[in-house]
Image (cartoon, rainbow, N blue to C red):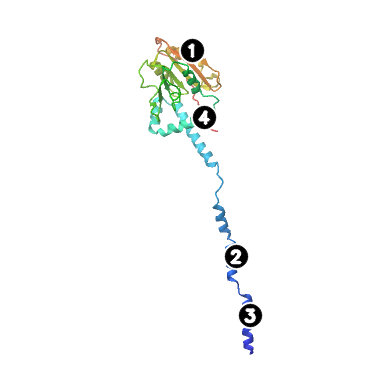
Amino acid sequence: MTNSEVRSKKRKKSSKHHAPNNNHHGDEEQELPSSDSAKRAKSSKPSKPSGFLEKMRARLSGGHFRMLNEKLYTCTGKEALDYFQEDPSLFNLYHAGYQTQMSNWPEQPVNVIIKWLRKQNPSFVVADFGCGEALIANSVKNTVFSLDLVSNDPKVIACDMANAPIVSSSVDVAVFCLSLMGTNYQSYIQEAYRVLKPGGWLLIAEVKSRFDPNTGGADPEKFSKAILELGFNSVKQDFSNKMFILFYFTKKEKKNSKKNIEWPMLKPCLYKRR
């Protein structure tokens, strides 16, 4: 073997020992994904549900309710009617917040009124001023005129409660359940007097704090006095519930002649941000 043949053989042998194994290297890339691939694989896993968005939605909804609630307490009935007629969806938003607030009460006044009505003559005609979801109409056998600012139900009549589309002296029971909200609330009670028959009942349920003089509320005796001067008899005041007060009146046979009645201002029931 010549010297050149020996050198050529050595070069081939050296090349065989040091040549990279491309196939083996490719197998390693398939078995060990890169860090970017690992991150993408990790991010594709479903994340745990977070309550953050739900909490934010609840806060926004609560904020809208407080705004609408304050609006109702600080404007006239006519202004409230116009406001909600422009965007009826706001009324639905308000009532969703209202139901949330009511769910925290141990007892709701509308249920007390329903129990009372069920003990009365089923032929009594009822006017539910500020009916909300028409719970009274859906719970008793009586004929019920359900009145509110917006109607999402055929049972409900949309109107300004100071101008109810009801014939005078045609109603046996007029109900205000947490609905004396306008700055002209006295005109609602005057309208109830108009539609009630002589001897008819007026039931008013209101948040108790609105009638606490120690915290800026109205004196319940002055409130009752104004209603008596309008032409009613006081039958009962129920302070037994810690959340609300119930007034029971009946319409006199003849209206009082006094014209200048002093109506106390009712404290707005505003909810604080939590």
Q: Callout 2, which amino acid?
A: Glu
Say which residue label 4 marks.
101
Tell me if mark 1 has few (under 14), some (14-19) or many (20+) residues whose alpha carbon lies within 10 angstroms of its own.
few
For mark 3, give the secondary structure: helix
**Up/down of 242 relative to 15, above or below:** above
Residue lying at 52% horizontally and 41% vertically, measured from the top left: 53
Question: Is residue 216 in view?
Answer: no
Label 1 amino acid? Val
The amino acid beneath tag 4 is: Gln
Q: Distance between the residues labelled 3 and 2?
A: 26 Å
- The residue lying toward the viewer, choosing from 19 and 205, is 19
Q: Does label 3 or label 4 sit earlier along the sequence?
A: 3
Coordinates of residue 262 in the picture (x, y in percent): 45, 15
Label ID, residue 261: none
Specify the amino acid type for callout 3: Lys
Question: Can you say which quadrant of the picture contains the C terminus?
Answer: top right
Would residue 175 be seen by someone viewing this image from the given angle? yes
Q: Which residue corresponds to mark 3?
A: 13
Give the residue number, with chain letter if any, for mark 1: 235
Q: Mark 2 points at which residue?
A: 28
Q: Earlier in the sequence, mark 4 or mark 2?
A: 2
Distance Cα–Cα, label 4 vs label 1: 30 Å
Q: Nearer the viewer, mark 4 or mark 2?
A: 2
**Mark pair 4, 2: CA separation:** 63 Å
Q: What element carries label 2?
A: helix
Callout 4 secondary element: helix
